[in-house]
Image: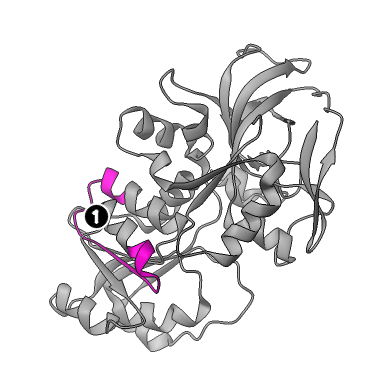
Amino acid sequence: MQAFEVKAPHDYHLVNMDPSEPGDGEVCVRVAFAGICGSDMHIIHGDNAFVQFPRITGHEFAGTVERLGPGVSGVEVGSRVCVDPVISCGQCYPCRIGRPNVCSALEVIGVHRNGGFGGSVVVPADNIHRLPDHIGLDAAALVEPYTIAANVLDRMQPHPGDALLILGAGVIGLTLLQMARAMGLDTIIVTDVIDERLAVARELGATHVLNGTHDDVESRILALTHGEGVPLIADAACVPALLPQMLRLASPAGRIGLLGFSATPSELVQLEVIKKELTLVGSRLNNRKFPEVLALIRDGQLDPLALVSHRLPLREMPDAIELLERHPESTRKVLIDIGA
């Protein structure tokens, strides 16, 4: 069985691995499709502080249950499932108050444990979610990115009529856009520095798109909001240097959702935060958002396959990585067909 293993930063190969046996409360999932995420690229580059090497990466995936461990009930071999990669202890303070995605002993499948870029993967049975009949395994592999969007929007607590500014039209920015549309937000402004990405954002429902290389973003946004600023700002660009601009563009009582893991300090002007009584929230992974996202896909309110720009077999994984690094203007989600 082939798998994609990152042995150390910049050291990755396709390897042969024997399938693992599920233990108590676990199932073995035969992976059908897996998506490459920006955090997978950070692992490859050595920029992920949480990964433990060597590692089979991949936390966006779907497949079928092929073996059950002892004590597992309520699921059958052959069930089509996607997998929530968040594993929490259930005992620590975050878990006790209903925020297991920041568990003190958090583990993430594909980061702390082996993930989906292999023929099969062992996961806790509690982390699998059965698929509605008409959701394909390719679309189901992309549920996880939408849970990221659902989580940060939930953290920002949208009100009816709120406008949303999304910085960055990469995959997370596009999932935020689709999720915001599904939630009923009418005004969604998307910024980026790549016109091709902004064109996709427009196709997916952005009401305004701005290119930071040639548009005066701040004056345009203030004009669009009649000088008031934007109530909701989601940082899908994850560039620390953009925080001062976000503070300036936020409306009084605005909420800013931060998603990046950079260790680079951001300049924070406290006056901007206090005079507007802004709320800055961090958002990590997802807090039990899989059922919500699956329901929206089932009802046709989200289209995961609209994110996919390329499909490649697992044997071409090194080519997929090169594609993502060299052609960001034409590459959105690269979906890996594990069985091809």
Task: Give the residue displayed 50% in from the left and 40% down from the top.
Answer: 142
Q: Position of residue 51 (x, y in %)?
A: 75, 56
Identify the residue under disc 1.
159
In the picture, measured across the screen, residue 231 lies left or right of residue 127, that is left
Quadrant location of the N terminus in the rendered image:
top right
Quadrant location of the C terminus in the rendered image:
top right
Q: Is residue 187 magenta?
A: yes
- Residue sitting farthest toward the left: 226
The quarter holding residue 170 reads bottom left
Q: Position of residue 79 (x, y in %)?
A: 59, 16
Magenta residues, as a range? 180-198
Q: Amino acid at mark 1?
A: His
* Residue 89 appears in the rendering: no
Q: Position of residue 227 (x, y in %)?
A: 16, 80
Task: Give the residue displayed 63% in from the left and 44% down from the top.
Answer: 59
* Local secondary structure at mark 1: loop
The quarter holding residue 250 reads bottom left
Task: Give the residue displayed 31% in from the left and 29% down from the top.
Answer: 299
In the picture, measured across the screen, residue 37 lies left or right of residue 293, that is right
The quarter holding residue 33 reads top right
* Residue 302 appears in the rendering: yes
Q: Position of residue 11 (x, y in %)?
A: 82, 59
Task: Give the residue displayed 66% in from the left and 45% down from the top.
Answer: 58
In the figure, 132 relative to 152: above or below? above
Say how the picture is coloured: one colour
Of residues 88 and 263, which is closer to you in this image? 263
In the picture, measured across the screen, residue 198 lies left or right of residue 54, that is left
In the picture, measured across the screen, residue 140 lies left or right of residue 17, that is left
Label 1 crowd bin: few (<14), some (14–19), many (20+), radius 10 Å: few
Q: Is residue 61 magenta?
A: no
